[in-house]
Image: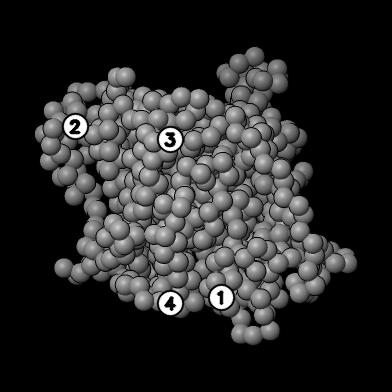
Amino acid sequence: MRASVVVLLFCLTACASEPPPAAPEPDAATRLSTPLGDIVGFVNGYGAHTWLGIPFAAAPVGDQRWRAPRPAVAWDGEREALAFGSPCAQYGSPLGGATPDQIGKPMGSEDCLYLNVWAPPGRAGTPVPVMVWIHGGGNVIGHGGYYDGGHLARGHDVVVITLNYRMGPLGWFRHASLRARADAADASGNYGTLDLVQALRWVQDNIAAFGGDPTRVTVFGESAGGTNIYSLLLSPGASGLFHRAIVQSGGLGFATLAAAENFTDDADPGNAYSSNEVLAKLLVKDGRAADRAAARTMLADMSHPNVAAYLRGKTTWEIFDLYLGGAGALGPSSPKLFQDGEIVRAGEPLALMANPETHNVVPVIVGTNRDEPKLFMVGDPEQVTSMFGIPLYTKDPQSYEREARYGALSWKRGGADDPARALTKALPGRVYAYRWDWDEEGRRLGFIDVGHLLGAAHGLEIPFVFGHWELGASTQFLFDDDNAEGRFALSDAMMGYWAAMAHDGDPGTGGGNHPRWSPWSEASGKHRTLVLDTAADGGIRMTDIEVTANSLLAAMEAEPGLDTEGRCRLFARVFRFEDEQQWVDAAWDRLAGGGCTGLDRVALSVATTDD
């Protein structure tokens, strides 16, 4: 996610919780030995051999908080891997797999570095590729236990792994006192990134026991998970640990070191929730300082060891509570990963990706959804009329669709097309782009047009990739018998393409009779993007769709039916969360022949649709 905006799709806490499923029974067919010890799992509903809650690192608690993960400790006896490990600490959200009774409340713990494995039966044969899923959720919500890799594993002969990683202020937090006398990894502040690297090291050391091939590891992930994959491409420590990458609706929203650490009134200012600002808030909240100014003075006199001990002595929720935004969620100023120069290379990301000497060169799939922003727009009371938490209709359908269209084009530019152009320079012919268009949710209760409200929104492609349709209470609003035939066919194709990438580094025809997915090309007249849709809406097809900064601005300039203020308002709405602020500022000055320069962009970014 570009911001930690919690949108409740269609069901709030009024939804009844389902009783927890019965615990599975250990199955002797899943018994095996790993370098860390003996383990037994079970056979899941798809027929995949399944092991849940396997530690891939030691618990990062106590003195290990805000340090690089240490290797997992071997266990004695046989470990029953029948239940997911604890999610990492977060405030519960339905978009992150929280149950209705967890929404808006603290959930998870700091002891959370666990992964889950699904494998096809018959491990005695040739090792199969490994697909490691990195969940999204703005790096503040989500966990590996929200996903079921059994269908993908059993149906496409791959080992699927889902995992947890530290999030929010435990995953990304940089301060001088934590760097003092620390090695480069401990000092980096990118602890969530280091968790992902450690999980990939675990794969190299252990996955052969599960039938996986450690020389064919694909990382795939969505939203913040996709952004984390971009960071792995730029991580020297991840070199050689993965061999293909699939980025779904990701982006390059990295924070600066100054934003992560400095006070807001420093010469190079930090953001309102930088580590120093948070420390000042803690001291005031504890009554150790009367106000922020006094806290700054106190911090200047505290030694690095004392500051580090003070931070590590706070409880999980004493830290998280400082970042609370609306609706029981971490606010938009929550920590973001950054290019520290050690764990993640420093420099302009696209330039680094274009140079084979400055990133981990592997075949890559990148893509976005046609209606990305609708997931965030559907919960906006300025744009959508709701009752009892259920969105009913948009207040201005034309404006809603227009904003969603341009927001999605912007996301495609920054999250897929710009990276595809850069990556192709380093590895021509091995970069593939897609756009996902499925919008056949239909109507509910006879008048709620879910296809219009959500369409091909952010994150909705994930069930198609896993071939698993249970999303809790929201499932009934998205998937039904009317859209089943096309949905299943599109899902089969997508699983085929994703698995073919894992097998061969080339999605090809998805292992079937689907259209051949051509790589991104800069040559004139070449198709560049694969559209993923059902036969009823044009089917799977290659197109020459491409978005650049200039083409996006030109389209906005030519958009009919808008006066100057309306055009400026559209721009302000679409780019209000844009990470590339320098580009946005320059484009704002150019838009409408300079007509926007005298207007208040922040005020215009607030929707003003009337009931």
Dot 4: few (<14), some (14–19), or many (≥20) neighbours within 10 Å? some
Give the residue type that dot 1 points to.
Answer: Asp
Q: Earlier in the sequence, mark 1 or mark 4?
A: 1
Camera-side residue: 359 or 409?
409
The mark lying in front, picked from 3 and 4, is 3
Q: Position of residue 391 (x, y in %)?
A: 43, 31
Is residue 291 depicted above or below 221 in this figure?
A: above
In 3D space, how far apart are the residues under numbered discs 1 and 4 (Cα atoms)? Answer: 11 Å
As drawn, the label of residue 445 is: 3
Residue occupying the point 55% across, 47% down: 471
As measured in the structure, the alpha-carbon distance from the residue carrying label 3 to the one carrying label 2 is 35 Å
Q: Earlier in the sequence, mark 1 or mark 2?
A: 1
Identify the residue under disc 2.
Answer: 567
Dot 2: element: helix
What is the three-letter code of the residue carrying label 4? Answer: Gly
Give SS at disc 1: loop
Disc with the residue nearer the chain's start (3 vs 4): 3
**Comparing labels 2 and 4, the label whose residue is closer to the camera:** 4
Check disc 1 and report the residue beneath it. Answer: 157
Residue under the point 55% across and 66% down = 152
**CA–CA distance in space, label 1 to label 3:** 40 Å
**Which one is nearer the viewer's eye here, 278 or 160?**
160
